[in-house]
Amino acid sequence: MKAAVVREVGDAHALKVENDFPTPELKAGQVIVKNQYAGINFIDTYHRKGLYPRDLPFIGGQEGGGVVAAVSDEAAEEGIKIGDPVAYSVFGSYAQYTAVPTAKLLPVPDGVGLDVATSCVVQGLTAHYLTTSAHADLIKTGEWCLIHGVGGGTCQWAAQMAKLRGFKVIGTCSKGKADVAKTLGCDELIVLDEVPGASYEDYESVDIVSRVMEVTEGKGCKAVIDGIGKSTMDISIGSLAHRGIFISFGNASGAVPAFPVLRLIGKSAYVTRPKLLDYSVDRAELVSRADEIFGWLKAGKLNVSVDCAFPLDQAAEGHLYLEAGKSKGKVLYQIDKLLDYSVDRAELVSRADEIFGWLKAGKLNVSVDCAFPLDQAAEGHLYLEAGKSKGKVLYQID
């Protein structure tokens, strides 16, 4: 199968696309997912660089979405079927196929696209635990929360979820991402200069602590959500309210250096360095978080921005794009597309002939839901996007 593989740690070009990597074997309690998308996340770059060591060689990625291609007996007993749309988070998603334990599968509901569902798994679930659990209830409805880097990735989700939780939100973003950040509903947006070629803003271009204290009338923020790391540590601690919590979850500008715990005594503050695995410890917790996110998406309360999808053949380019700070939303790999499996007329006709043969023999059932007159073009799209269809939706032209 095709996969983006790391055999030696290094820069983005350490991620090599191989066409003959072994396809995973189906084991008890697993399914095989045929991936359509894989999410690109900063943690993937930390694995590739060796900052978070993994055994070599390894397939990159830990977030994917696609359809179930094979099921174990145990998975079948749980009602999982071939063809089910699913998303998941396990290592090895930068590939055509991934073996996924059933406990890690998230069924994708009607009305949620696989690209959006894939985007939800790491960034969405991370934002969910950051805004619902990692603060240990030290922030209450109506209190202030500072979130760094709301112009892209995880913190786009986090800003919206914090508002859904009833918090007042101060967001930081770069000038180049202010257009996106302004759509998130932050109560206050602090816009910063950019650092050319970096994935983070110039946090010295504005006195953020002074601005936070001005906005909060000298009280500070009960929670600070910080995925930037080294460049924002002092700002985050300085922006805390009494008995506030500094939630450090990322290293975009470098790892947070060690600091003496006595720094927290002035405000009796708290600090935590959480990770997603500790906030999705079993299937019940995982599905509970996902269900709430998918519910918000379907209700239109949460907007997900998919920035772009790189072909898997451009694996290095995807990492370079993310690390350069160019993204204004989720960055994905598109693993397979129909054109790759109908490269000429012979292959196209061969596939069609087999399908038509199954249809004529009564081995394949096709449900046509409805056919809109072309004069009702808009209604056709609205019907499909609302998730109302129970089969194929068509336009009848004449």
Image: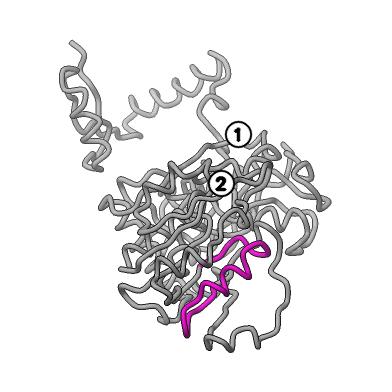
Residue positioned 72% across, 36% down in the render:
19
- Check if residue 229 falls in the magenta segment: yes
Q: Is residue 226 visible?
A: yes
Q: Position of residue 294 (x, y in %)?
A: 34, 56
**Residue hosting label 2:** 38
- Residue 105's place in the image compared with 378, above or below, is below
Please say if the residues under marks 1 and 2 sit with CB atoms less than 8 Å apart: no
Amino acid of disc 2: Ala
Using the image, tell me which numbered label, if any, was put on residue 311.
1
- Residue 131's place in the image compared with 118, above or below, is below
Residue positioned 74% across, 47% down in the render:
5
Of residues 55 and 221, the one nearer the viewer is 221
Q: What is the spatial separation of the Cα atoms under label 1 and label 2, in whole angstroms?
A: 10 Å
Q: Earlier in the sequence, mark 1 or mark 2?
A: 2
* Outermost residue toward the right in this view: 8
Q: Position of residue 268 (x, y in %)?
A: 53, 88
- Residue 131's place in the image compared with 195, above or below, is below
Instruction: Kindly indicate the quadrant of the structure image that contains residue 354.
Output: top left
Highlighted magenta segment, given as a residue range: 225-246
Using the image, tell me which numbered label, if any, was put on residue 344.
none
Q: Position of residue 196 (x, y in %)?
A: 67, 42
The count of marks equals 2
- Check if residue 335 falls in the magenta segment: no
43 sits left or right of 100 in the view? right
Q: Is residue 1 visible?
A: no
SS state under label 2: strand
